[in-house]
């Protein structure tokens, strides 16, 4: 997704139904499981997931803009994202007590994911931008 697009909105093709809580869903990167949704915000143009990575990155939470979600499997309670584990691991540091409502942090996070979507990922253009 380019930084000019809305990284913080759910993609229509993801299968997400507005008003559905994704808290507790498992989260799958393009190359494997990364954790569970700890918090889900569904505000228009400000939607995101806070993912508890558990033992994968011990004690770390990551902020994922809703625009990174490629598919929501409500039956199995799994959220799939168009990111690799490495991209998520290298994302901007996130402290849910400090950064949750920090617009500057949201901008940095959106810029990071907008500029680090792998070429050919679902919803991406030829240069790897959404």
Image (cartoon, helix red, strand yellow):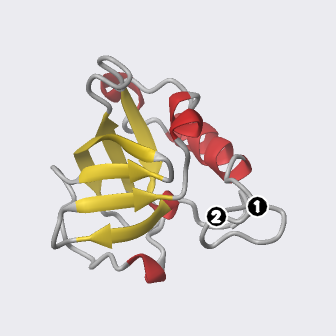
Q: In this view, does 118 lie to the left or right of 88?
A: right
- Residue 22 sits in quarter: bottom left
Residue 42 to residue 54: above or below = below
| Count of picture labels | 2
Where is residue 78? Give x, y as percent. 26, 60
For the view shown, which residue lies furthest in the right direction? 127
The reply to whether residue 8 is visible in this rendering is no
- Mark 1 or 2 closer to N-term? 2
Who's the residue at 62% across and 73% down the image? Answer: 123
Q: What element carries label 2?
A: loop
Q: Name the residue under label 1.
A: 128
Who's the residue at 46% across and 82% down the image? Answer: 13
Who's the residue at 32% across and 69% down the image? Answer: 72
Q: What label does residue 6 carry, if any?
A: none
Q: In this view, does 14 lie to the left or right of 59?
A: right
Q: What label does residue 121 carry, if any?
A: 2
Quadrant for the N terminus, please: bottom right
- Residue 10 sits in quarter: bottom left
For the view shown, which residue lies furthest in the front direction? 31
Who's the residue at 76% across and 72% down the image? Answer: 125
Where is residue 115? Give x, y as percent. 73, 48
Quadrant for the C terminus, please: bottom right
Where is residue 76? Give x, y as percent. 17, 66
Q: Say which of 111 and 80 sits in front.
A: 80
Disc 1 to disc 2: CB gap under 8 Å:
yes
Residue 86 to residue 23: above or below = above
């Amino acid at each position: 997704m380019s930084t000019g697009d809305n990284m913080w909105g759910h993609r229509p093709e993801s299968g997400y139904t507005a008003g559905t809580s994704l808290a507790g869903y498992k989260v799958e990167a393009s190359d494997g499981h990364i954790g569970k949704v700890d918090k889900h915000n569904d505000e228009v143009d400000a939607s995101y997931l806070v993912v508890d990575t558990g033992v994968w990155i011990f004690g770390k939470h990551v902020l994922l803009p809703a625009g990174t979600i490629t598919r929501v499997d409500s039956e199995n309670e799994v959220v799939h994202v168009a990111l690799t584990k490495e991209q998520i691991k290298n994302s901007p540091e996130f402290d849910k007590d400090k950064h949750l409502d920090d617009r500057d942090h949201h901008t940095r996070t959106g810029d990071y994911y907008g500029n680090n979507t792998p070429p050919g990922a679902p919803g991406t253009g030829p240069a790897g931008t959404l």
